[in-house]
Amino acid sequence: MSALSPEALVTLDGITDHQRLRTRRIASVLGNRLGSSALDYTVAHHLLEGAEHAARARDADRLNWCRNATVRDLTHLSADPHIVLSPRPVDLLRSEISETAYYLVGPDTSPAPPEARDLVRAALASATEHGFGTLLTQHAPVICLLNRRRLDETLHSWALTRLPGTVFTDYTAHPEILARDLVHEAAHNWLNDALAAYDISLPAEVTFFSPWRGTRRSVFGFLHACWAFSLTVQYAREARRSTTGAVLPLLDAHLRQQAVQFAAAAECLDQALLYVSANEIRDRIGRAVGKVVSLA
């Protein structure tokens, strides 16, 4: 099985169609005029969730804003073509849509500080240089920077199925580390969209051992890990070639750790992929993991 470039791996026409259809449906429910870009798709889900929150809280002003806002109303938050946010811990939400904290764009959302936007721009430039610009434009158009950490501290990042296209992540002062984590979470968003676009339902009762979690996980969780970490490894391999200083040993340690994880996971991949009925998705996951394993 020949390797595909990162750009080719994440190019899938069905996803674009899915995003546009979903955006039109949300716009119809809200009654507003959203466009057809990936950013519109992502913002649409913020507005939909925000409208539900506002309705439950009987907040007529916020509900009205969510029903009428468009991407054009959010240009003050932009680091084109992305929206960059730095929500305070007190502004993070928890509800039935997620076990983890999240944030919704609203009428009172403030722009991220200039240094945060500059860091994101540098991270996006690094990701684009190494072939992941399309992935981040299409599947991470809204970036929420959370806690600034040192290089030796644990970084947490996540994405939510209910807020596709949004990435929540801790960060350091180094754009290569931020780019790595953005690639990882955008990959999760890509796979969620791909499965939805091709109407694929994976059996929850079938499990495989995931070396990343050290426990058995559903087909969904196992394949998500294989896909997201395979793209992370591909980015890190390329980024380390032009990286110096303290970031280089961190990327090298990441690659060594992932080589061990993929060696343990690869033997189950073919069996897990049998549950993916769409050739387009099965082929891309297989190629991405195969590239990682072959070069380990």
Image (cartoon, rainbow, N blue to C red):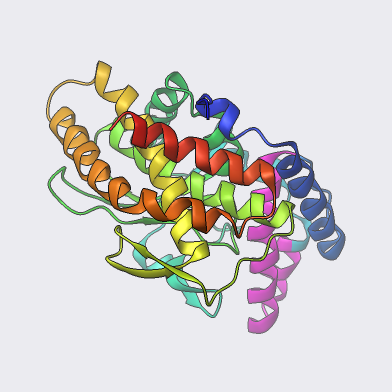
Asked if the stretch drawn in magenta spans residue 291, the answer is no
- Asked if residue 267 is positioned above or below residue 56 in the image, the reply reads above
Q: Residue furthest top?
A: 242
- In the displayed structure image, the side of residue 64 where residue 113 appears, left or right: left
- In the displayed structure image, the side of residue 14 where residue 276 appears, left or right: left
- Asked if residue 81 is positioned above or below residue 42 in the image, the reply reads above
Which corner quadrant holds the C terminus? top left
Res 42 seen here: yes
Q: Residue 190: x, y in percent?
A: 58, 46
Q: Which region shows up in magenta?
A: 37-66
Q: Residue 110: x, y in percent?
A: 49, 50
Q: Residue at x 19, y 39 (%)?
A: 256
Asked if the stretch drawn in magenta spans residue 63, the answer is yes
Residue 207 lies in quadrant: bottom left
Q: Residue 226: x, y in percent?
A: 42, 50
Front residue of 110 and 180: 180
